[in-house]
Image (cartoon, grey):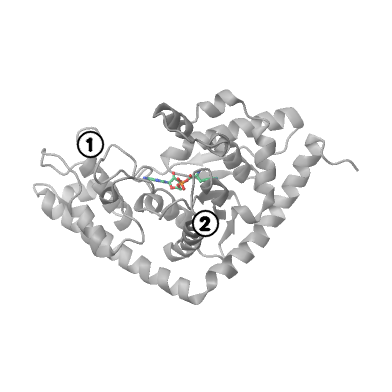
Amino acid sequence: MKRMLSGIKPTGRLTLGNYIGAIRNFVAYQEDYDMYVFIANLHAITVPIERAELKQNTKDLIALYLACGLDPKKATIFLQSDLHEHAELGWILTCNSYVGELQRMTQYKDKTAKGETGITAGLFTYPSLMAADILLYDADYVPVGVDQKQHVELTRDLAERFNHRYGDTFTVPEPLVAKVGAKVYSLQDPRKKMSKSEDNPKGTIDLLDEPSVARKKIMSAVTDSIGIIQYDSEQQPGISNLLTILSSLNNEAIEDIVARYAGKGYGEFKKEVGECVYQFLTQLQSKYKEIIASGMVEKVITEGNDKARQIAHKKIMKVKKKVGFQLF
Ligand code: TYM
């Protein structure tokens, strides 16, 4: 069975973008792949974050993974910081990464281009740690949203470079980016990604938003004056984004939704999208509350960590030997 791995960083509350672009696919893929899903909390501290917030976000993320349908019997769910192998391999890969290629990574590039101050060295080497996450497990596939594809491509380069220098060690992974929903946009500025860190909360739907608040956000989403419901991300980014959201949550093809709305107005369409999001969040949050109350979060992570560690440990020992760290 082919292996698949992906992770999310607990820097803020999870968004509908994270669900549609990532978690929804993890849930589908767990049926057919040897699935590893983790919480990228080492990556979360590349930007400043309070301890209490990080802890809360991490617990919420595990509970939301489960509430969204990840099944610990099918998918191994683990916590990155509990496995020192990630930091160890991250360092070794950092020493095999060039400054120039890390400078080309868009997340770092965008922040420096905006003249942001206080960018940490950890943010700069973020992609080589991400490569370590993937290569430790010999993942064949890495399901991600569009924004992470570049990091997986760098991972491929690092794997090939390492294999070439030290002999065959790592599987070269492939990014898997879904056709629909790989980038969900802000409801207020539909040319920008919906993000955990967006300044305007009206643009982002958090998975733990009050469902009626989320419905209002959909009703006040920015659209256009064209008046036709169709998928055209250039001319109608707002409507196209709402089509993506509805199609992903309802499993209905975008063409079918467009056909249903021929000759109808934006108000009616937004009402359906709002209702769909409302229902989705209501059900999700009820499962989330049950999971938190059951105390199963700790058990899932302990068992997942143990399983992941068996693979990670073997791999790091092999790598250390190849590099010349193992003396006897
Ligand atoms: P993160 O936490 O920013 O996002 C987690 C996943 O959600 C996807 N995503 C989106 N998809 C569609 N529309 C959006 N608006 C949207 N926002 C986020 C992301 O593409 C991603 O798939 N570096 C990673 C975490 C990571 C990782 C890894 C992932 C660390 N190590 C190894 C895969 C493999 C990150 O920051 O994702």
Number of numbered discs visible in the structure rendering:
2
- Kind of element beneath mark 1: loop
Write the residue at 75% across / 40% down. 319
Choose between 277 and 212: the one closer to the eye. 212
Q: Is any atom of residue 327 visible in this view?
A: yes
Q: Quadrant of residue 33?
A: bottom right
Image coords of residue 283 (percent x, y)? 34, 68
Q: Amino acid at mark 2?
A: Arg
Label 2, secondary structure: give it.
helix
Q: Indicate the position of residue 325 as horizontal and vertical percent values.
A: 82, 39
Position of 87 relative to 75 (above/below): above
Label ID, residue 232: 1
On residue 319, the disc is none
Query: Which kind of residue does numbered mark 1 sit on?
Result: Asp
Above or below, 302 relative to 120? below
Q: Residues within 10 Å of mark 2 (few under 14, many from 20)?
A: few
Q: Which residue is mark 2?
A: 51
Separation (CA) of disc 2 from disc 1: 43 Å
As drawn, is 227 to the left or to the right of 281? left
Nearer the observer, 146 or 299: 299
